[in-house]
Structure formats: C-alpha cells, structure tokens
Image (cartoon, rainbow, N blue to C red):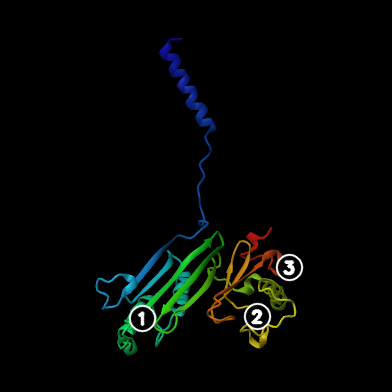
C-alpha cells in the first residue's frame, strides 16, 4: 500500500472508531434545578444632599432579589420589605416607600431645628441565602434611623417552596399536633444555650407569662430550623438578637414524610 493511501486508511479507521465511542445526544427538558434572579436597587437621596457623600446624606437604599417569571415570589419579597418600615401610612410599592422616607426627612420640623444636622437612613435588603431544586431561602434585613437614641433593626426570613410556588410555613414541615413537643425540644436547647437550668425562671426575658415560646421567624437550613428573635422581642436592645438552631436529628419524629427539609435528612 502506498504511503498516502495508508495514511488515508488510518484516518478513516480513526473517524469510525471515534463515532462508535460517541455518547448519544441527550435532550434536556423540564425545569432547571434553581431559579434565575437578579438584584434590583432603589436609591433615593434627600434634596439637600448635593454632592455630599452617602454617609452625610439622608437617603433610602433598598436592594432585593427579583426572580424572572415568578410573580408570587416577587410579590412576597416586596411585601416583606414594605412591612419592615412603615411611615405615617403604608406604601404600596418599594419605590413609593423610598420616596416617602426621604420626604419624611425633608418635612421633619424637629430635625430642621436640630443644630447637629441629624440625617435619616433607611437600608433594607432581601438577599438569597440558599436555593436548590425545591427551596429558595431569603434573608430580609432592615435598618431605619429617624432620630432617637438608636435606629430600628430587623432581620427576617422567607422560605419558598419552588415546586408549589408558595411560602413555607411550620405546619408544612411538621406533622399535625407537633407544637408542644417541638416547643419542649426547643426550650431545652434554649436553656442550654442561655446557661439556664431546667427550672430556672424566665422572668428576665420578655416571654408572655415567663413561658418559653417560639416565634414564626425561621430559616430552613441544611442542618436544622434556625429561629431568630429580634431586639426587644425577648431581650433588651443592648442584648441584641438571639438565634436558636433546632437540629433535625432532635426533631426527626416530628417531621412530615414529604417536605422541603427531607433532602437534608440523613
């Protein structure tokens, strides 16, 4: 066989061999595992800001996640942000909230008489903490200062079932009648965390009737349900926020057979 012909033969064999080992093409269908989102920023500065830096200017800054094609989720995020700060009257949109906040600064007669040139600050955000094929978790943070000894801070959570397109409530995670058993487990963890005995009084906390209680401010995490009490909820402002993590291995018997936390159970 001539050299040129032999080379052509080898190339042909190589091409055939490669085609025999090619993987068949796979057509991807169905929904993606996670949702696509972007962050939107709304910013309003007071009319007297001029060229002053943000730190010396009264302004409202709102940053939040927007999910394309998921209106119910977007509406829930906007509503949670609107609830974190309410002026003289509730605002219908976040844009209106930002404008109303700055307007409140401009028309504040007490502020105008203040020789220290007090400034107003509103910082709110809704940021994605984690997401997977069935769950999106979002943290809501807010800081508002309109005078006084200190500003108002708040941290909250939104857990969203992407399959059912709705907010996740505790009743969606636990079996019926879970409440008291869950509360007992949570109180034991709380007392250990606070270095309290099983019989220590809770009079120094702001629980109703000095009885431990969970709130509805929780985040679904891969290791457990994380609760958060904001300032003034169970402790003074100076003592800050209080977090309480309830691991899944402590409450396994109380969990529904099918829920958004099943993926985290071992």
Q: Residues within 10 Å of mark 3 (few under 14, many from 20)?
A: few
CB atoms at circles 1 and 3 under 8 Å apart? no
Which of these two is toward me, 204 or 220?
204
Mark 1–mark 3 Cα distance, whole angstroms, equals 47 Å
Q: What is the secondary structure assignment of the residue under circle 3?
A: helix
Left of 257 or right of it: where is 104?
left
The quarter of the displayed image where residue 180 is located: bottom right
Mark 2 or mark 3, earlier in chain: 2
Q: What is the secondary structure assignment of the residue under circle 1?
A: helix
The quarter of the displayed image where residue 85 is located: bottom left
Total marks shown come to 3
Q: Residues within 10 Å of mark 2 (few under 14, many from 20)?
A: some
Q: Position of residue 80 (x, y in %)?
A: 47, 76
Mark 1–mark 2 Cα distance, whole angstroms, equals 34 Å
* Residue found at x 61% / y 84%: 206
Which of these two is toward me, 250 or 237?
237
* Residue 213 - label: 2
Mark 1 or mark 3, earlier in chain: 1
The residue pinned by badge 1 equals 101
The residue pinned by badge 3 equals 253
Q: Residues within 10 Å of mark 1 (few under 14, many from 20)?
A: many
Q: Position of residue 258 (x, y in %)?
A: 66, 65
Mark 1 or mark 2, earlier in chain: 1
Q: Position of residue 207 (x, y in %)?
A: 63, 84
Mark 2–mark 3 Cα distance, whole angstroms, equals 20 Å
Q: What is the secondary structure assignment of the residue under circle 2?
A: loop
Query: Hey, which residue is sitting farthest left in the picture?
Result: 50
* Residue 35 - label: none
Q: Position of residue 53 (x, y in %)?
A: 30, 70
- Residue 41 lies, with reference to residue 28, above or below; the image says below
């Amino acid at each position: 066989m001539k050299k040129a012909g032999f080379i052509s033969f080898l190339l042909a064999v190589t091409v055939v061999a490669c085609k025999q080992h090619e993987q068949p093409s796979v057509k991807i269908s169905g929904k993606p595992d996670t949702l696509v989102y972007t962050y939107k920023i709304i910013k309003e500065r007071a009319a007297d800001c001029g060229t002053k830096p943000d730190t010396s200017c009264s302004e409202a800054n709102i940053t939040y996640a927007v999910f394309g094609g998921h209106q119910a989720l977007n509406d829930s995020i906007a509503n949670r942000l609107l609830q974190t700060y309410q002026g003289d009257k509730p605002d219908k949109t976040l844009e209106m909230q930002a404008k109303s906040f700055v307007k409140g600064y401009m028309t504040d007669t007490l502020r105008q008489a203040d020789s220290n040139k007090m400034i107003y600050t509103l910082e709110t955000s809704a940021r994605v903490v984690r997401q997977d094929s069935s769950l999106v978790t979002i943290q809501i943070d807010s800081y508002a200062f309109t005078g006084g000894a200190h500003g108002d801070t708040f941290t909250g959570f939104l857990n969203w079932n992407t399959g059912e397109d709705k907010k996740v409530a505790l009743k969606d995670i636990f079996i019926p009648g879970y409440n008291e058993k869950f509360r007992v487990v949570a109180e034991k963890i709380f007392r250990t965390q606070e270095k309290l005995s099983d019989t220590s009084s809770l009079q120094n906390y702001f629980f109703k009737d000095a009885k431990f209680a969970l709130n509805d401010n929780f985040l679904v995490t891969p290791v457990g349900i994380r609760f958060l009490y904001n300032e003034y909820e169970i402790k003074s402002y100076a003592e800050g926020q209080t977090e309480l993590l309830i691991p899944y291995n402590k409450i396994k018997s109380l969990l529904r057979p099918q829920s958004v936390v099943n993926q985290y159970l071992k």
